[in-house]
Amino acid sequence: MANEIKLLLAEDEAALGQIIKESLETRNFDVILCDNGEKAFEKYKSETPEILVLDVMMPKKDGFTLAKDIRAIDDTIPIIFLTAKSQTADVVEGFSIGGNDYLKKPFSIEELIVRIHNLVSRTKEQKTAQVLEIGDYTFDFPKQQLQFKSADAIHLTHREAHLLFHLIKNKNQVLDRSLILNKLWGTDDFFSARSMDVFITKLRKKLKADENIQIINVRGFGYKLTD
């Protein structure tokens, strides 16, 4: 069908992988299933999927390593991690290396589908978005690049770019913490909130060349970008 979403699923638990594949295929997805990271990397290069769903713990090449390899050549494809891990450090690491979302096992297929559609639509939004100005910076959202005057462009991760996009669009207004967590992370739980704090810190560092730009933490509400 013309509006199918082509998805690469990497999951080494055979029964779980097949259940996810069959469930998604009944909901208008074209699913490529691989049982280890090495196979998934080869299929990624040959099949051009629109989104990746990667188990973290896999043989031959784990999900984090696979994501790093893919991010080295592709900055925009959405990545969702499936993980049995729940430690904050593991979740933050997943986002830091370029993941866009994560689901802790066990999870519902319905929740996975919602997150897939959300990420795919955001990626399409990014490709049609405009170049924005903030202080002495130029922010090219489609290219995920931030440039200060005539200096070299700074590359942003997928999540950094989307977070900055929403901060700029709501400049001088408080960006509701729960709203942006649900939109970009799919949940406003503790792990996601900690992850967003990390990304806010990274954006502050990348915007520090213009001393007038501030990302203010409005306690109990969210963040406000001013220039």
Image: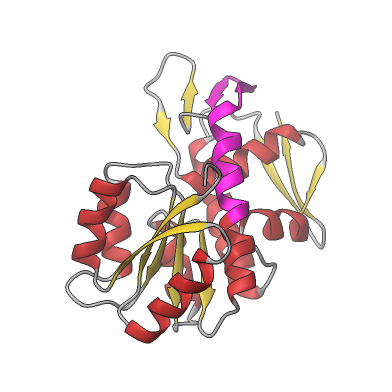
Q: Identify which residue, 14 or 124, lies in the foreground.
A: 14
User: Residue 43: percent from the left, percent from the top?
Assistant: 25, 55
Q: Residue at x 67, y 67 (%)?
A: 187
Residue 191, by quadrant, is bottom right
Q: Find the magenta span and give its range.
A: 117-141
Q: Is residue 16 magenta?
A: no
Q: In the rendered view, how is the structure colored?
A: secondary structure
Q: Identify which residue, 97 or 194, lies in the foreground.
A: 97
Q: Identify which residue, 183 or 8, lies in the foreground.
A: 8
Q: Does the magenta stretch include residue 137?
A: yes
Q: Residue at x 65, y 32 (%)?
A: 213
User: Residue 107: percent from the left, percent from the top?
Assistant: 57, 80
Apparent side of residue 219 relative to residue 93 in the rendered image (left or right): right
Residue 78, compared with residue 144, is above or below; it is below
User: Residue 87: percent from the left, percent from the top?
Assistant: 48, 81
Apparent side of residue 114 relative to residue 82 in the rendered image (left or right): right
Residue 135, by quadrant, is top right
Residue 73, compared with residue 27, is above or below; it is above
Residue 209, compared with residue 49, is above or below; it is above
Residue 109, by quadrant, is bottom right
Q: Residue at x 47, y 33 (%)?
A: 144
Residue 95, compared with residue 224, is above or below; it is below
User: Residue 182: percent from the left, percent from the top?
Assistant: 70, 60
Q: In which quarter of the image is the C terminus?
A: top right
Apparent side of residue 174 relative to residue 181 in the rendered image (left or right): right
Q: Residue at x 38, y 49 (%)?
A: 49
The extreme top residue here reads 150
